[in-house]
Amino acid sequence: MEIEAKFGIPDEQTWRRLLETTSLARFSLGPISLAELHDRYLDTAGRSILAGGYACRLRRQGDRTLATLKGLGGAEGAIHRRAEYQVELTGPLPPQEWPPGEARDLALRLSGGEPLLPLFDLEQTRYGRLVYDRDRPVAELALDRVRICREGSGIATCLELEVELLPDGRQEELACVVQELREGWGLVPESRSKFERGLAAVQAGRLTAEERAVVERLTGERPAIARRARLLLAWDEGLPRTEICRRAGLSPRRVRYWLSAFRRQRLGIFPSHPVPPPGPTPAPTVELLKRPGLTPDDPMDEAGRKIVRFHFQRMLSHEPGTRLGEEIEALHDMRVATRRMRAAFRVFGNYFDPQITAPLLKGLRRTGRLLGAVRDLDVFRARVQAYLAALPEAERGGLDGFLAVLEEQRNAARQAMLAYLDGPRYARFKERMAEFVETEGLGSRPITSAEGEPRPYRVRHVAPIAIYERLADVRAYDEWVSVPNPSLTRLHALRIAGKRLRYTIEFFGEVLGPESRILISEVVALQDHLGALQDAVVASGLLRDFLVWGRWGGDLTGQPPPDRAAPVVAPGVAAYLAVRQAEIQQLLSTFPPVWQRMMAPEFSRLTAAMVSGL
């Protein structure tokens, strides 16, 4: 008989305070142990195990697989008393292949020998501690981050505390701990098991009777709509993913996409009219956050999630304008949002599991690269047109051939961008990113080291270090750029380092002193100066390529430029090249005073004042 107490934890701050405490009532707490648990709950198609009053669980922990049958019910407030039968397996085997014993006999009796199908999964990060009365362990405390998953997608999360009575413990001691958690910590008892809450979360996402009637009718619509409807009907029946794919005639990737969209939009995934408009189904309108909402006591993982959520919303909000292409600033703003998200993962990435963040970063890089290819040509075209507008009208035709090539390259870049935005890779990236920013605790790493030692994890502890590290990265260039004729490559790298410093200050801006605004303006001045320099360098390279080959190298097709017997004769292009090279020299000559402001003692004083309040 298992005897344990369960409590829901209302927020992240309470959960972390509980993790840091060293005692409960008159009991001391031992060191923290960390475990990653993967639980899969199973039942027959007719739910015969549930009908028999049990839940069947396969738990994978490291190299071990445990099969458990747990009785349902038996809760009095926070205290749960449940029958439990458990057996260790060599892998995820059906009951017929379990070792002989009570667990196998009960599973076969309840299931009637029918195959067991997955209901849902629980992914848990468990921080365990023993509860001691002097040297006697009386209970085991577990702080769990729980993620409820269905068919590979997260559908709910929760924070929970469990206290399980050990053989040497007494029930009155467990009652004492329960009283402390209720009265001293204000925790609310949880009368439902994780299985019962997981089952409720799964069933809550299913079709209502009204929705099912609509979806059944839609199976007679055009093929694209009918496949989507068959998918939902198969999913509503609780069928395995392979059977859902077969019935719907869709790939696993598309099934994941439409199920994720359904959870957000319900029947909004179907158009109002029989023939849907071209392109992806539009996302529901979301009110943009005015600010990320950081506080000094935020843990770094959740602070990072707030920052990424803030800029992810902006990326999505600028997507329609980017697709339309009428205002180039929409594309610029969408690209900036992807850059800020990448920068956020550099600042906060150590607080997340790389296996979770790696696909997100890959998607950000791919999205930013395709947006950037169009944006850079937009900026270049605008600069050329501004130059032409200042020329006498009789001289404005000297760049016609060059502008024709530029327009050809831009159109090719835009077509590549739109193909990506309409494709499955971008849809999957958005789906993953939406799940990440909306799921508290997803991918978060432990706040203790492998040896159980605490790691700095609150914003007020880490922000000053992060800012000073980025400032050191910038100032490290001093000996390389405070020389006559500094390397253009070094100056470009300095621009990137400056951008990272600026983004880091902006990320923590809500918790920093007012000096942050002055510092950001100084870094922006450095960025703008070096950005204009880099634009002139890139433009000069493209113009030189055109004069040699009639196009520029490294085009979007990846094909090398054609061989030519003689350079292109284009006086207008040559004249514009001379203008851009003169611009490079002018920007180099005016760089030292901009750089000296970054190295001045006043910048250091403002930085110290900015972080002093944390």
Image: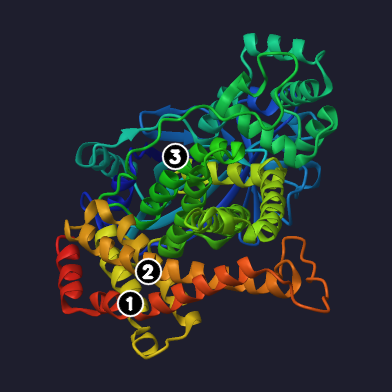
What is the three-letter code of the residue carrying label 2? His
* Earlier residue among tags 3 and 2: 3
Mark whose residue sits in front, 3 or 2: 2
Residue 338 versus residue 402: which sits nearer the camera?
402
* Secondary element type, mark 1: loop
Task: Give the mark nearest the N terminus, 1 or 2.
Answer: 2
Which residue in the structure is indicated by mark 2? 529
Residue 471's place in the image compared with 287, above or below, is below
Mark 2, secondary structure of its residue: helix
Residue 153 placed where, x, y %? 62, 40
Q: How many numbered discs, if any?
A: 3
Left or right of 580? Residue 572 is: right
Q: Which mark is residue 590?
A: 1
Q: Residues within 10 Å of mark 3 (few under 14, many from 20)?
A: many
Q: Which mark is residue 355?
A: none
Q: Nearer the viewer, residue 289 or 293?
A: 289
The answer to which quarter of the image holds residue 79 is top left
User: Which residue is at the front of the view, 154 or 566?
Assistant: 566
Q: Quadrant of the C terminus?
A: bottom left
Tell me residue 36's x, y (percent).
53, 56
Instruction: Give me the disc on residue 158.
Output: 3
Check disc 3 and report its element: helix, strand or loop. strand
Q: Please state which of residues 288 and 166 is positioned toward the viewer in this rendering.
A: 288
Which residue type does callout 3 highlight?
A: Cys
- Residue positioned 62% across, 31% down in the render: 261
- Measured Cα–Cα span from mark 3 to mark 2: 48 Å
